[in-house]
Image (cartoon, helix red, strand yellow):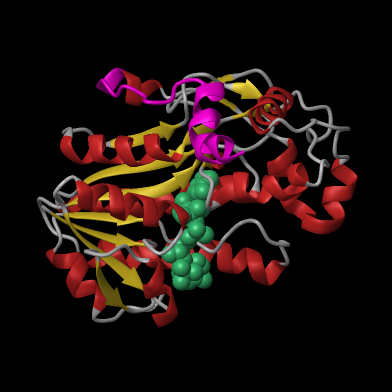
Amino acid sequence: MEVFIAGGTGFIGRHLAKYLLRRGFRVKVLVRRPERALVISEGVIPSYGNPIIPGDWLHECAKADVIINLVGANIFARWTSKYKELIYESRILTTKHIVSVLTKGQILLNASAIGFYGTDRGEEEITEESAPGKDFLAKVCKSWEETAFSAKDKGVRVCTLRLGIVLGRDGGALSKMLLPFKLGLGGPIGHGKQWFPWIHIEDVCAAVTFLIKKDVSGPFNLVAPEIVRNKEFIQTLARVLRRPALLPVPPKALELIFGELVDILVGGVKARPKRLLEAGYIFSFPELFPALQNLFKKRLLRR
Ligand SMILES: NC(=O)c1ccc[n+]([C@@H]2O[C@H](COP(=O)([O-])OP(=O)(O)OC[C@H]3O[C@@H](n4cnc5c(N)ncnc54)[C@H](OP(=O)(O)O)[C@@H]3O)[C@@H](O)[C@H]2O)c1
């Protein structure tokens, strides 16, 4: 089975490409900058092109059995109006181009985010049936998913991946939290009571493989069954790293650095992986402490 990954040079894509390759898939990855070909694992086939511009790379999409679309400008930046445009366009244009060449029988797994539900949902239990949020990122996710689901009309099986905060050592939010921790400055954000919907990178790879093989479609929350609050996450991370969890980080300080993005860091929804569990997916890391222990075990053994 051939898989084409757009956005395969990023944090999740690199792990996923390697994971699928080891399980016997033929894996092709879209590379927009030649120097990024270096991050691809041996055995993965690069295909060159810019996902926001239609080009020859779309022939590869048209040929693959499965297309995984992870393209998107990183949200961890200051959200100027120009950057917000890039966050939106990099996702929607890429998805539109991909959908334009798909035909009956192909499978599209398209990234989305738990941000689909917005940030201000308090104690509400969030499942795939919950209504979308109204903030900027929620609107981006909604358009992103609508664009992906438009492929259904062509007979394509479409799943959207509403990703929580993906935990891995070499990318994503966790890698950004490590430096303050190493400096002894790690602490919860604000009051720390906000929910922190996390998932281990290995479960992302395994769940995507599960969705390729299982005949299901629609949106899927990719979050671990054990949901924790931000304060508990920070305390557990501190325990695993054997570093102190210090004073709360005031949201105002973050606002100076990140602007509007701070709402995402301070808000968090109590999301559940309802549809994945119903479909029969078994998490390798359903609980936070063992998940973090697994990610840092090599480091702890070296100490
Ligand atoms: N990681 C998480 O915790 C998380 C949570 C929720 C949702 N997601 C979503 O899942 C997707 C993958 O996440 P990730 O953590 O792997 O992201 P990432 O490491 O930032 O990788 C993003 C991918 O998109 C490409 N890209 C970035 N900006 C682009 C632009 N302006 N034009 C065209 N391509 C561009 C990158 O190419 P280069 O390698 O050339 O830069 C890379 O292949 C993203 O869309 C993200 O929003 C991630």
Residue 128 or 63: which is nearer the viewer? 63
Q: Residue at x 25, y 37 (%)?
A: 211
Residue 302 location (% of width, % of height)? 56, 40
Residue 181: within the magenta?
no
Residue 6 or 40: which is nearer the viewer? 40
Residue 173 or 120: which is nearer the viewer? 173
The picture quadrant where one finds residue 81 is: bottom right
Left of 130 or right of it: where is 205? left
Whether residue 72 is visible to the viewer of this picture, yes or no, is yes
Residue 281: within the magenta?
yes
The picture quadrant where one finds residue 251 is: top right
Q: How many marks?
A: 0
Whether residue 131 is visible to the viewer of this picture, yes or no, is no
The magenta segment is 278-303
- Quarter of the image that includes the C terminus: top right
Q: Residue at x 32, y 35 (%)?
A: 207
Residue 248 location (% of width, % of height)? 86, 33
Q: Is residue 96 above or below residue 174?
A: below
Left of 124 or right of it: where is 5? left
